[in-house]
Image (cartoon, grey):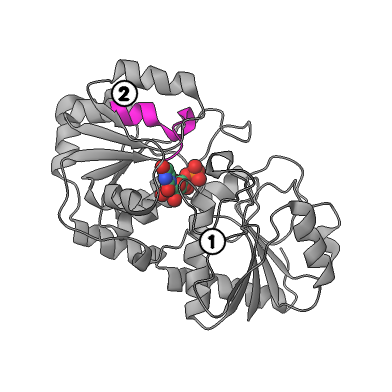
Amino acid sequence: MNIVMINIPFKAPWLGENKWITVPPQNYGGIQWIVKNLMDGMLELGHSVTLLGAPGSPETHPKLTVLPHGEIKDIEKWLEENEGKYDIVHDHTCRGEEFNENFNQFNWKVINSHYLSSVPLRKKNIVAASQAHAKDIGMPNVPFIRHPVNPNNYVFTENKSNYLLFLGRVSDWKGAYEAASFAEKAGLKLVIAGPVWEKEYFEAIMSRYKKTVRYVGEVGGEKRLELLSRSKAILVFSNSVTGPAGRTWVEPGSTVVSEAAACGTPVISSSNGCLSEIVPRVGKVIDDLEVVTQEAARGIIKNLPLPSDVYRNGLEDWDYLKISEQYLQLYEKVLHGHTW
Ligand code: UDP
């Protein structure tokens, strides 16, 4: 199949003038990692992939073409000019607001992932990342497919160090504060890695939990892999507070959960959104952190699943080839005129 993947395009000022976040991302970037792991699967299964929305990404496979279009208007123009030349467009741009209203009236066959909007639906063929996500966007009956993970992009080890990890945007809805609270109860250090765009929130954590937390900034490359694979557990305490789209946050798919699993790193999480669906396979879900005592927190750490079980269970569900096959089945349906 000839597949067009559209990444969520972002310029990152901190990378330098006019530099785009690539696929895979230089540092923070959940959707970019999902696109990377999925593209790996499609390429390995023999399909061709043309990538838009991530100029400068490495062309790491003979069947991968990276186009220089990042601005939405340029992507739209390219799509208009190339109508009919490819089989399917897999759009990861998320919000349903970016493309103009005519986009889906082109002759393209489209699949849409990561839809997070509360605006009236303008997209068709939406695929959610979990049951919770499908419900949250008001479409409980759309298909859902978990985030893919390619273990070759991660490092598995059974040799864990004695610290916990928060890896993500340091924001209220991602639960960095709650991660620090859990780490303190468990008597372990918490490494926080990720961008800080909500300064007051970050400072509140650092002043309340200064003895527990070590902040290492936004990480990429080797440093990110080392943290992911060496931490004793990763903490994902997503919160039901107002999220980036201005609505109550419901964790849609959680990239870090499948990434941790590929490293054999157990996950300790809240029950927000998809977490109660996926984390029981690879760790422990805590319904109400406030009632967790020091003793209970230490007990949770003691009883974490083995790295080999975490890896096996995670990959059984989220392996990139399996997930690619699931998408290919939907692509086929769309190619045969099926729409939802
Ligand atoms: N991440 C990273 N460096 C950081 C913080 C996060 O590479 O310093 C990556 C992390 O590995 C994951 C993504 O950013 O791939 C965050 O995605 P997730 O779905 O967990 O969170 P969201 O996209 O909702 O912020």
Residue at 41% across, 31% down: 175
Which residue is tagged 1? 35
The disc, 1 or 2, on the residue closer to the chain's N-terminal end is 1
Looking at the picture, tell me which residue is in the foreground, 124 or 107. 107
Q: Nearer the viewer, mark 1 or mark 2?
A: 1
Give x and y (percent) for residue 4.
66, 70
Say if the magenta span includes residue 169: yes
Q: Amino acid at mark 2?
A: Glu
Looking at the picture, tell me which residue is in the foreground, 135 or 102. 102
- The answer to whether residue 325 shows anywhere in this view is no
Up the image or down, 252 lies above or below 288; here it is below
Q: Which mark is residue 144?
A: none
Does mark 2 have its CB less than 8 Å from ligand 1?
Answer: no
Residue at 64% across, 46% down: 18
Q: Is residue 142 left or right of residue 186?
A: right
Residue at 69% across, 40% down: 118
Question: Dot 1: within a 10 Å radius of its alpha carbon, few (fewer than 14), some, or many (20 or more) residues?
Answer: many
Give x and y (percent) for residue 14.
54, 39
State the extent of the magenta-drawn residues as a range.
Answer: 168-180
Q: Is residue 254 left or right of residue 7?
A: left
Q: Which mark is residue 290?
A: 2
